[in-house]
């Protein structure tokens, strides 16, 4: 896991084929979820596909500089509500989606693919473009492919001790 990083440059010649895409989605499919609700969905697009332009045109300039070269763009969705009501389908939908995304990206790393998760896109425009079913909301995107850069040598992470001690303010 220490080798994982979020590249800002992808090799545009490294395609993600159908078999690889199926393996990524299979890994996400097996993620745990509250009550086995599986409140996640994915809209995938690859360079050269009609769907790719539908996604790319909504990227913010900051992400368009690097995400368009990825072999695969994945729009992540959570099923938060029942149909077009405000009745919660799952109060854990976003958490469960995060589990599925983690499974997908770890599978990608095992396959030699690098992933960069991001939110730098026009959410309203992409939602109008893709028109998800009622109750579903777009949450984030993932760019997957072969990194065309090495990870930065200064990848500071919080210590395990810090993870265990923060953010508690326990009184005795």
Image (tube, rainbow, N blue to C red):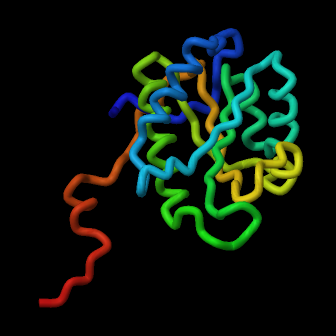
Vertical arrangement, residue 78 with respect to residue 58, above or below: below
Vertical arrangement, residue 19 with respect to residue 55, above or below: above
Residue drawn at x 51%, y 41% is 101
Where does residue 118 sit, x and y in percent of width and height? 63, 45
Where does residue 147 sit, x and y in percent of width and height? 57, 21
How many numbered marks have been drawn onto this rendered protein structure? 0
Residue drawn at x 49%, y 35% is 28
Q: Which residue lies furthest to the bottom in this view?
A: 172
Residue drawn at x 62%, y 15% is 16
Quadrant of the rendered structure where residue 107 is?
Answer: top left
Where does residue 116 sit, x and y in percent of width and height? 57, 36
Report whether 26 appears left or right of 137: left
Q: Quadrant of the N terminus?
A: top left
Report whether 73 appears left or right of 154: right
Vertical arrangement, residue 168 with respect to residue 163, above or below: below
Q: In which quarter of the image is the C terminus?
A: bottom left
Residue drawn at x 64%, y 22% is 10
Quadrant of the rendered structure where residue 9 is?
Answer: top right
Where does residue 19 sit, x and y in percent of width and height? 57, 12
Query: Which residue is nearer to you in this view: 23 or 34?
Result: 34
């Amino acid at each position: 896991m220490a080798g994982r990083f979020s590249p800002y440059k992808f090799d545009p010649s490294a395609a993600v084929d159908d078999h690889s895409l199926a393996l990524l989605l299979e890994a996400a499919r097996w993620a745990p979820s509250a009550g086995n609700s599986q409140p996640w969905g994915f809209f995938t697009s690859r360079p050269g596909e009609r769907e790719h332009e539908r996604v790319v045109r909504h990227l913010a300039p900051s992400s368009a500089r690097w995400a368009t070269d990825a072999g695969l763009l994945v729009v992540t969705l959570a099923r938060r509500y029942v149909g077009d009501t405000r009745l919660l389908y799952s109060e854990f939908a976003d958490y469960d989606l995060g589990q599925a995304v983690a499974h997908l990206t770890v599978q990608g790393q095992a396959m030699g693919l690098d992933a960069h998760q991001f939110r730098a896109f026009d959410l309203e425009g992409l939602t109008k473009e893709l028109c998800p079913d009622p109750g579903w909301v777009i949450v984030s995107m993932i760019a997957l492919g072969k990194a065309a850069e090495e990870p930065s040598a200064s990848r500071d992470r919080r210590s395990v001790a810090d993870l265990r001690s923060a953010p508690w303010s326990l009184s005795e």
